[in-house]
Every structure is written in C-alpha cells, then in structure tokens.
Image (cartoon, rainbow, N blue to C red):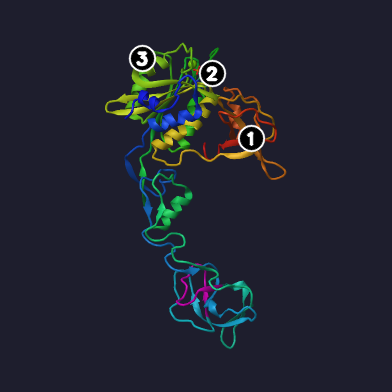
Amino acid sequence: MKSLAQIAAELQGYDPRALPAEAVNDFLARLVEPVQEVEHAGIFEALGRVLAEDVISPFSVPPHDNSAMDGYAFDGAQLKADAPLVLQVMGTALAGKAWQGEAGAGQCVKIMTGAIMPAGLDTVVPQEFVSVRAEPAEAITIPPGLLKPGDNRRFKGEDLMQGQAALSKGERLTPAGCGLAASLSLKTLPVKRRLKVAYFSTGDEILSLGEAPREGAVYDSNRYTVFGLLTRLGCEVIDMGVVRDDPALLEAAFTAAAAKADAIITSGGVSVGEADHTKAMMKKLGDVAFWRIAMRPGRPMAVGRIASGSRSCVLFGLPGNPVAVMVTFLAFVRPALLRMMGCTVAQPPLLKARSAEALRKKPGRTEYQRGIVSTAPDGSLQVRITGNQGSGVLSSMVQANGLIMLHHAQGDVARGDEVDVLMFEGAI
Ligand code: AMP
Ligand code: MG
C-alpha cells in the first residue's frame, strides 16, 4: 500500500494548495482498493450489488428457435412475390408444448409466441395477415409481398449463447441484470460484500435533531444528505451523528469508525483557519493530506488513511457547507467508493444541454452550478441555473435536477452555448 507522499510523487505537478479537480480523482484512484470478500446474494437481494465474477451462460437463451408471433409456421422457400400462398394447417404448437410431426410443402402449423419452431419450418406469418378457411380442411391464405423467408422466427441463443459472459465482474446489478440472471436459472449471484462507511458531522454550532435551537447554531443537514447518498450507493451506513469540537470525543469517534468501517466521511472543520480540532485529530491519527481544490463550491477537503490494527480505513474529510458536501461527494467520493465496491464504471455519462443564460466562469477552476434541465420547445435540452449558487443554499440542490459542470480550462458561457451536465438521476 502506497503512502500519500508516494502517491503525490507519482502525480505530475501535484500541488495540494491548488489541486485541479481531475487530479483529485487520479489521486483517489491510486489511494483506494476494492474490497475482496465475496458473498452469494439471493437474486432479490442482489439489486445494486457489484458482481464479483463474470456470469457465464450455462445454456443458450432462448434454448430453441421459436416463434416471435402468434401465427402460422411454414417453410419460407415457398413464398412467391406475386401470388398468394395457400397452406393446409397440420396442427398447433403451443408455448411450452412443441408440435411433434413433420410439415412440408403446402403445409403449415398454427403456432403461438414462444413455441418451438417445428422441424424444417423457418418462417411465421402473423395470424392477422392471413385469411382462414375451415372447410374441407383447415387452410390459410397468405397474401403476396408481406413476408420474407425467416421472418418472425427467434433464433436459439439470440439473447445469450451458452458459454458467453452474460454479466461481467464489476457490474452493478440493475433490474435488467437481475432478470437476465434469472433467465439463466440462477438463484444466487456472487457479489462483493457491502462497503461499510461511517459518517459524522463536526462543529460546535451543529445541532442534532431534537435539540433546542440556540443562537448561532444550525441543524445538521449533512448527516442526512450523506446518509441518502451512501444508501443510494448501496453502502452499509454507520451513522455516528454529530461530534462536538473536543479532542477526546473526536479521537474516540475516529478510532471507533476506523475499527469497523472501510471508509469514514466527515463534514466540517477542514477549511483553512478553522479554530477546531478536527484537522489536528486527522493529522494525529492518520496519513492525511489537506487540499485546497481548484473548484467551486467545495474548496477544502482532507483525504487519507487511518490505520486500525492491520486494517486501514480511507478518510474523506469534506467541507461543512451543505452544497459543498454534496458536490464533493458526487465529484470525488462517489467514484472512489464505487472503486472500493469493486465497480468498474465510476461516473455516469455527462449530458449536453444548451445554457438558457450567460454564465460567468473563471478559467483555472472547475465550477459546479445547480441546474434545471428541461426540454425546449424545439425538442432540444436546455438548462438554467437555480438562482443563488451559494455553497450553503441547500434548497438549490432540491430545485436542481443536475449539476452544470464548467470544466477547469473553460471560460464564460454565452447564452445558447452547450454545457456538460451531471444529472442527479443515476448519480444520486
Ligand atoms: P466549516 O467547513 O466547518 O467551516 O463549515 C462551513 C459552513 O457549513 C458553516 O457555516 C457551518 O455552519 C456549515 N456546516 C458545517 N457542518 C454542517 C452540517 N452538518 N449541517 C449543516 N451545516 C453545516
Ligand atoms: Mg466548522
């Protein structure tokens, strides 16, 4: 395991006092390691978990060629471009009950969706395309020009071939992934164990819910946003409440958290000029770097490791401002935690939208503005900001449905320019 100094030495131009946002993610990618332990989760519990191994199809899906429609199966070689085709109905193939027999020239088999294609037949005409005659023997007439040979037949293995990787190690299981696993008759899936993340808020001015209001004090909101963000990520959250600005209490909290968690997230107490003990305690107990990141909101952040016995726990010391907490979580902590979870996909894709207004932006830092993405009358995507972009204005995060990401080198944005947006849906 590399020390923070070793990681810093690997990064070109590393400057903890003016760190570009991209450098933060590079640093964290080197700092964190995926959990190793594997569990076998029942399919109902596997949603959102990270696959620990590839899932190989033990058989092909579908297991046979079958019909994609309710209709009549026949040999498509008989189709003529300019004449109707009349076929005698020899029997019925049902889903789950194959038709045993042989149908040849001038013959067809009534077939239901999902039923196995009878031997030698390769084409299905949907029932609504044919006229049926009952006497003297049941027969159908297919008008010309409607079908090509092979139409409406699904191939064996067109979903999954036997031996193929159906799901890959490092994928987070989606509803579709769980369904696909079930189509392979898998009741359990090998997943990484859940990541344990401890969280506490710091600051003497922070009130816990239920406490009486006090002049100059604010109720703790970070505890609840972080709880929500971690829960959505599928982490096991260890909620440690608010810790007062007292060295003994802080030491006890960090030590207890490091003993049981893979990662600790704190909020508050990492800004320059903080009069409190949080930074001092981080420094005392761990290998910790204190950064000033070239970003807005969320400039100060502490990152490092705290050892507990032979284990070590990753520390993310987030700023105190409620919006800065969410932004630094989404930009840096979330991708790092996903890596720790064993996940290979770290960030959701960015969306492009036209800015509905001019935005001021200083090159040389990354800015995250709270945006509301909507569909413009011409059908394109547009985004406007929520108004007050103060880093303490949590209501702006409630109004927003995404973060406009103005990159490090980017300058002012003119009205109508395209900007990148990190949508909350999928990230939160
Ligand atoms: P700090 O980073 O400790 O200087 O805090 C910056 C600002 O965020 C201050 O106005 C704090 O009162 C506020 N703050 C810190 N922690 C929390 C919290 N858990 N909930 C709400 N506001 C907070
Ligand atoms: Mg503080």
Residue at label 2? 218
Residue 40 position, x and y percent, is: 34, 47
The three-letter code of the residue at mark 3 reads Ala
Note whether 55 is above or below 249 in the view shown: below
Note whether 173 is above or below 152 in the view shown: above
Q: Nearer the viewer, mark 1 or mark 3?
A: 1
Q: Earlier in the sequence, mark 2 or mark 3?
A: 2
Mark number for residue 372? Answer: 1
Residue 240 position, x and y percent, is: 41, 25
- Real-space CA distance between mark 1 and mark 2, rounded to the nearest whole angstrom: 27 Å
Would residue 209 be seen by someone viewing this image from the given angle?
Answer: no
**Residue at the farthest bottom position:** 136
| Pick the front one: 183 or 358 | 358
Would residue 273 be seen by someone viewing this image from the given angle?
Answer: yes
- Real-space CA distance between mark 2 and mark 3, rounded to the nearest whole angstrom: 23 Å
Ligand 1: does it lie within 8 Å of the C-beta at label 2?
yes
Q: Which residues are magenta?
A: 108-124
